Amino acid sequence: MEVVIAPADELARLAADSIEALLTRRPRTVLGLATGSSPLKVYDELARRHKDGLSFAHARAFMLDEYVGLPAEHPERYRNVIEREIASRVDLAPGAVQGPDGNAEDLDRACADYEAAIAATGGVDLQILGIGTDGHIAFNEPGSSLASRTRIKTLTRQTREDNARFFGGAVDDVPRHCLTQGLATIMSAKHLVLLATGRAKAEAVHQLVEGPISAMWPATIMQMHPHASVLVDDAAASRLQLADYYRQTYAEKPAWQSL
């Protein structure tokens, strides 16, 4: 696991660099897209680079999760969020972005079909991730199986409170259930890039990087991934015991080595 501590704008550029390198080398790259606040600067940077000529025309993308039961036109339905924040701002082809169907009549079948769709592409090449204050990635709440696959989950009160800001501050308007890629699904991606900023994420980042692997802090499973990048600002890194070492390692990194 590589830990980079830098200002948020630099973190966004680093993540975008990795995506651009993939698209340049392999135009049919498969991306994993996350919602929430953490990836927004990355999407802004990718949109800027698209204007400068970076093409997504042959790429495909998979979403991490989706609320259950939100109307198709709801602005906070994650498919609409991804369309607004990144898909409509680059040249991803129609239908190139897929997400689990939170309005399916048979949710179990929708989850199985989603797993099959990811596998049929050969898997995700680079997965963008954020982290919740309780250590969840995607919507794998504390207690999630480390071997889990795409499934329906009940959201914790804390997650719903954290997400209420997207619903005008009304916790009761945040859905209680979601479909989410499982931890094993996420771990199947070839490269994981997690971004976290702000002091509210400091304990979760500390557990992710330096704590024991535990279902109580689901993101800690990333310690077992062969290619995981954790990009955090000073505030999110404030609980890291080895923060000075991570800074030293990044400062002395060979110029030819990317994330």
Image: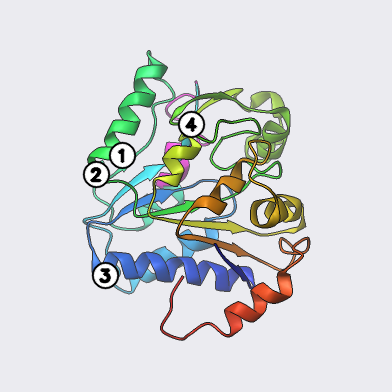
Q: CA distance from mark 2 to mark 4?
A: 20 Å
Q: CA distance from mark 2 to mark 1?
A: 6 Å
Is label 2 in contact with label 1 (beta carbons under 8 Å)? Answer: yes
Residue 215 vertical placement versus 105 (above, below): below
Mark 1: amino acid = Ile
Q: CA distance from mark 1 to mark 3?
A: 22 Å
Look at mark 1 in the image and give the residue it sits on.
118
Magenta: main secondary structure equals loop
Look at mark 3 in the image and give the residue it sits on.
24
Q: Which mark is residue 121?
A: 2
Label 1 SS? helix
Mark 3: amino acid = Thr
- Residue 73 within the magenta-colored segment of the rendering: yes
Choose the circle earlier in sequence order: 2 or 3: 3
Foreground pick, 42 / 51: 42
Look at mark 4 in the image and give the residue it sits on.
148
Choose the circle earlier in sequence order: 1 or 3: 3
